[in-house]
Amino acid sequence: MRRRQEQENEVPILWRFGLPRLGAGRNQHFSQIEHTTGLCKSYEDKQTVLQEKLRESSLRLSRLESVSWRVDYTLSSSELREVNEPTVLLRFQVNGPDPASKEPIVASLTAEKFRVLLTELKQAQVMMNALN
């Protein structure tokens, strides 16, 4: 009896996922419950396999392998006669979730943006250290 109540509760949930409504009559409702029972049974049979497949493909984070940087100082440009502005060039070597993928990420920051990034990274480090 309890399983039948659970299945009846699953019908409206499955409607939200696109299961067609068969009508308002009692026979159609039980037909829909039987259809839902079939779907639930199929899911239960494959649940372990589905969960394992999802574990393999989800929550895969990239790993930062290295960071290299340099500071360039621009004296002038073709548009401006005098610039006198430092630029920080960052290169992050990132290994993606797939071991074969290595993605370099290059960023060019003004001195002010670099200061902001550095401050936020220090704040993140403090928060991470507090977790340990």
Image: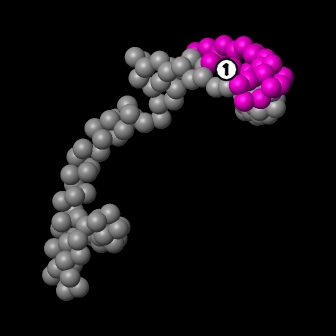
Residue 13 seen in the current view: yes
Q: Residues within 10 Å of mark 1 (few under 14, many from 20)?
A: some
Magenta stretch contains residue 40: no
Q: What span is in magenta? A: 64-91
87 horizontally vs 26: left or right: right
Magenta stretch contains residue 86: yes
Who's the residue at 49% across and 21% down the image?
A: 103
Q: Quadrant of residue 105?
A: top right
The amino acid type, in three-letter code, at marker 1 is Leu
Q: Quadrant of residue 93?
A: top right
Residue 73's spot in the image, x, y percent? 79, 17
Q: Residue furthest bottom?
A: 25
The residue nearer to you, when weighing 111 against 32, is 111
Who's the residue at 25% across and 67% down the image?
A: 19
In which quadrant will I find the C terminus? top right
The residue nearer to you, when weighing 38 against 17, is 17
The residue nearer to you, when weighing 125 against 102, is 102
93, above or below 55, in the image: above
72, above or below 78, in the image: above
Residue 21's spot in the image, x, y percent? 23, 75
Q: Quadrant of residue 90?
A: top right
Name the secondary structure under disc 1.
strand
10, above or below 95, in the image: below
Who's the residue at 16% across and 73% down the image?
A: 31
In which quadrant will I find the N terminus? bottom left
4 horizontally vs 85: left or right: left
For disc 1, the marked residue is: 90
Q: Majority secondary structure of the magenta segment?
A: strand
Residue 122 seen in the current view: no
123 horizontally vs 68: left or right: right
The residue nearer to you, when weighing 1 against 68, is 68
96, above or below 68, in the image: below
